[in-house]
Image: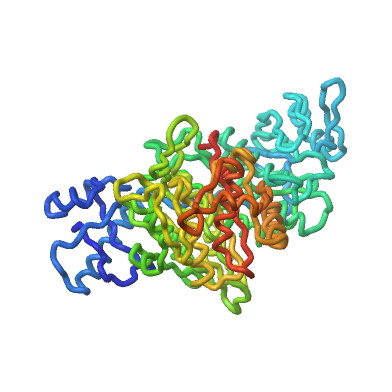
Amino acid sequence: LNCMAAVNAQRILCARTSSFVARSCRSPASCASQGQGRVSIQACAPYQLRHLAPFRASPSLDQRRNMVIHAVTASAALLAKAVRFEPETLVAVKVVDGASPDTWEGDLLVVAVTEEDLATNNEVTSIKSARLQSLSAACPALADCVAAGSFEGKQGQKSKVLRVGGSPGVKAQNVVLVGLGKAGKAGVLPEWGSSCWQMLGNAVATLAKEQRAVTAAVLLLEGPSGGAEADQVTAVAHIATGVMVGGFESSQYRSKTSPTASKLTEVHIMGPGATSAAAAQPALVKAAAVAHGTGLTRYLVEAPPNVCTPNHLALAAAHIAALSPATMKLEVLEQAECEALGMGLFLGVSEASDEPPKFIHLTYTSPGEVKKKIAVIGKGVTFDSGGYNIKAGPGSMIELMKFDMGGAGATLGAARIFAALAPPGLEVHFLVAACENMVAGHGLRPGDVLTSAAGKTVEVNNTDAEGRLTLADALWFAQEKCGVSAMVDSATLTGACIIALGPEIAAMYASSDTMASSVAAAAKAAGEKIWRMPLENNYWEQMKSSCADMKNAGGRGGGSITGALFLKQYVKDGVEWAHIDMAGPVWGEKAG
């Protein structure tokens, strides 16, 4: 392909996008010196879709447009062949009316039990409840499951897996018990974290993976505490989501298929505690949508930084828009357009990178009347070196800074869910200011003063406090260009949040109690751990500058709070706003 710049090119693929160039070098200068800027696409590594180099001649607008279309098509196809944006398939989950252990045939039967189904005397556990005794009479192996390994039915606990080989009472090849915890607390809204039904689904996925099971069934002896039909439906949705996302394994960048990859293709839910198949169907559709969104987020966050560039995030947004063209519209603002809008903070962060910044604006518009406009904004720093305040030494986690776009991953995952479900009455703007934070002679320096799109000036006293700079211009865009009345941003904003809340809990800041309650309720329903933190205005003293309107970083104490206070400066009165600092839960070290 000829290296080229999309000068004055019109929007391609529903986006303002520059040409993609497949090549093996990184600098425009060396590109221009290699064979008149030509490179064989067959010889290119599949992930090296890099920068733009200037035209050698001045072709007409039509010629430029045709060249851009050719480059976009060829290079996007090359990338799509090598890297997926989400899992190709999901486990099929359905409720089967009338099925029972003596009729269901498959690889693995998972029986959900509560602590009240069992009794422990002298450290020996036995079956207590009549319903489990009845099942055990048909399949004596259940008693062995209970006795082996001190199984007590605690939430998420798994018994030993026993091979029964299709006995008369249980036709499954293998049987296992999984605990729901105390029956009185087996509701669909947990006190904290994941519900027992989500954990049950995760356990099914894990057990199936360990047993190399292709088919599995979940036997519910009773439904969630409370017994309402709506709760039964929600419990089935939680199980399904847990099954669909629980078997995830990071293997896309391995040269060989993982020997431990799950073989599970189908899960049936049955028993007196399950709702009917007809009632469950809408909930299962929603569960699949959530699983697709979660899978897309995980694929983006796990991708190495030489793959997940700002351009890759833009392509992911294009993938989502293509799935639902009737409700999704994509616009990608290039550097020149961001300059015209005055996004000095965002562009300041990207200055040192060879990767062009991309301001991604994906809009969902529901069919019918729009009653509310909201924005979901994600931090999209695809690699964070720290800039001149470079991340160095033990604990800096520079080797993991591919996940600094976790907020963008969550935002695009949410967009993927909206594309599948098409909820009514909403216009939702999904915004990502995508760039890298690198080190170079032409890059951002400590002490520089930048001007935001809102007109406020910022003294950059720490180039490693870059995420808030990109978010500030995105917050301005959401209000001034999209006219939203409420917005939520999510970001791996501060290491201070990990110090305060550890690796599993996200911090949440909100402009009002109403907004905080709404976000907290949504997190509770989803099984996410978030904790509201104070917007302590006295801490703003740390952020005052002697030469600009504000600094971008304060002292060591309360770093997560001062980061949120910085963002608050860019929220207009009357606009509901919440900020989620997800630096801890963005990454699970064990799962990779």
Q: Quadrant of the N terminus?
A: bottom left
Q: Is residue 297 left or right of residue 254?
A: right
At x 49% / y 52%, what residue is drawn? 552
Q: Is residue 64 visible?
A: yes
**Based on the displayed image, in which of its 4 quarters is residue 537 positioned?**
bottom right
Where does residue 570 sit, x and y in percent of width and height? 54, 62
At x 19% / y 71%, what residue is drawn? 63
Say which of 555 and 278 sits in front. 555
**Based on the displayed image, in which of its 4 quarters is residue 314 positioned?**
bottom left
At x 75% / y 29%, what residue is drawn? 151
Say which of 266 and 249 sits in front. 249
Q: Is residue 453 left or right of residue 42?
A: right
At x 21% / y 74%, what residue is drawn? 62
Q: Is residue 278 visible?
A: no
Chosen colour scheme: rainbow
Residue furthest toward the front? Answer: 546
Instruction: Name above or below for residue 503 compared with residue 298.
Output: above
Where does residue 222 sit, x and y in percent of width and height? 80, 47
Counting labels gives 0
Instruction: Name above or below for residue 81 compared with residue 556.
Output: below
Where does residue 259 sit, x and y in percent of width and height? 47, 33
Say which of 380 and 446 sits in front. 446
Residue furthest toward the top? Answer: 122
Where does residue 364 sit, x and y in percent of width and height? 52, 69
